[in-house]
Image: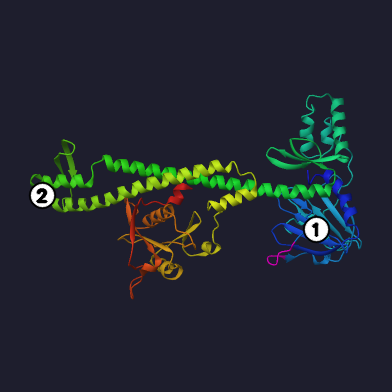
Amino acid sequence: MHNNYYFLRQLAPALTRQLAGFKVVTCFSQEKDELVIGLTNGTTEFWLKAQLSATFPALALPDTFHRARANSVDLLPDLLGRTVADVSVFPHDRVLRFAFADGATLLLKLYGPRPNAVFRAAPDAAAELFHQRFTADATLAPALPATPLAHTDPLKRYPALGDLPPRYLRTHGYDTADAAEREHLVADVVARLESPTEYYLVSVEGRTRLSLLPVGHIEQTLPAHPVAALRAFVPMVLSRRAYETELKQLRQTLERRAEEATNSASQARQRLHALEHGASYRQTADLIMAHLHEIPTGVAQADLFDFYQDQVRTVKLKPTETPQRTAQNLYRKAKNQQIETRQLQERIERRETEAFWCLERLEELASLTDLRALRTWRKQHALEPETKAKVATELPFKVFEDSGFTILVGRNAQNNDLLTQRYAHKDDLWLHAKDVTGSHVVIRHRAGQTVPDPVVERAAQLAAWYSRRKNDSLCPVTVTPKKFVRKPKGAVAGSVVVERERVVLVEPVNPFERNS
């Protein structure tokens, strides 16, 4: 109820007593949707901070305020030097009116979805709006007195009550009471709202609220001093909102990483099982070499006795090459299969470890109950929010973000040249599908941080996906620091020489599309 009419009607006279005779000495903004006004009477300062955002409009009254040296802009210059005469509230509305001794006015419209500030240097002067898109606020004025509505439900006669008084009434038997009792209950509540003896910081449906009635879970009881109540309530809510937002983001990040790691380990296990229980390239090559004398020239397949499985097996051949050449190619593939098996085992162990780590961190989140502890814990575990560099969105490449690392992918041969020769730093990681044409891929270096293996793996999948090996089941990808990549003089666009490399085998896929 910090913006409710019944609270504002308590706040307005309190501000009048506090601010009468104070002069405005500064008016500025240093954050979006924020209006800060500093006042003084020569010996004492007073600060008003109006937060005019649709998500949480509020009037904060900090004890002191330190203006930032940068990213700060002066506002409403005609307001400076004016002396406060009176503070009032529009009848049955959520608008505070600051009247100045010379006839100027400042309205703080604290509506939930459309808050605003409206300044007039004189009664007939043009209005200056904080949110200029709300042009109708230029004519903002108190509503004309209306005849009380003759509702059978007495609650309907008080449209400014808000949501907490009806909730309070329901807990006191309003729904089952007869007409006379309802009249009595509503009259009692309105009387309490007009002359409260205490304020309450309460929790209602997971939200911290300032209430003039004891409703929901009462966290704190405050004296009925509206200025002190705002000074206690607004910082608490802002801190809790930040905590709840960051906690939710952290939980989603850890759950996503755990799910992704679990799926990756499962896929690797399936592939490893297929390799270990299927006929290997080496076994097929051994069968061909053992039955060379039985294989006719130029056939597409041959039925050979498989001494590994003790049964006859049909082996596919290429009519255009000799059986010896087919066996030789299979032995070469068998070497890659051994590399793949080793990498799959490493990937399973690495990804399962990552999944367990994420699950352990999720359990720890329950013990972090305040914002400072949450941020300290997040920093300890390198879980800072991922921020996308603004420049990345303006680069002429495909841009992906993964665990805080930026991945750039070239679009064509000329674009590859631009990426590798002009944009890539010597410490960036450079990737490319081995022995075929394709996009250059660069993982931007972050000072003091080693690129995690899962990030390298996904970048390698991108390099395979944007290459001629896109439709292969597996693709070898070159990975090396950019400093080991050079372009020979006179070479065609996109052509480079790699002086030192390691090779990873990955499935050609765009992991960011698959996981989105």
What amino acid type should be assigned to the residue bearing mark 2?
Thr
Q: Quadrant of residue 271 in the image?
A: top left
Who's the residue at 32% across and 67% down the image?
A: 499
| Residue 70 is covered by the magenta coloring | yes
Who's the residue at 71% across and 53% down the image?
A: 53
Label disc, if present, on residue 47 of the rendered structure? 1
Kindly report the secondary structure that dominates the magenta region of the rendered protein.
loop
The numbered mark, 2 or 1, whose residue comes first in the sequence reads: 1
| Residue 322 is covered by the magenta coloring | no
Q: Closer to us: mark 2 or mark 1? A: 1
Count numbered badges in the picture.
Answer: 2
What amino acid type should be assigned to the residue bearing mark 1?
Trp
Q: Name the side, left or right, on which 510 lies relative to 296.
A: right
Label disc, if present, on residue 265 of the rendered structure? none
Residue at image mark 2: 297
Q: Quadrant of the N terminus?
A: top right
374 vs 266, nearest the viewer: 374
- Report the span colored magenta: 66-72
Percent across and percent down for residue 347 are 38, 48
Q: CA distance from mark 2 to mark 1?
A: 95 Å
- Residue 89 visible in the displayed image: no
Q: Residues within 10 Å of mark 1 (few under 14, many from 20)?
A: some
Who's the residue at 53% across and 44% down the image?
A: 361
Who's the residue at 40% across and 66% down the image?
A: 482
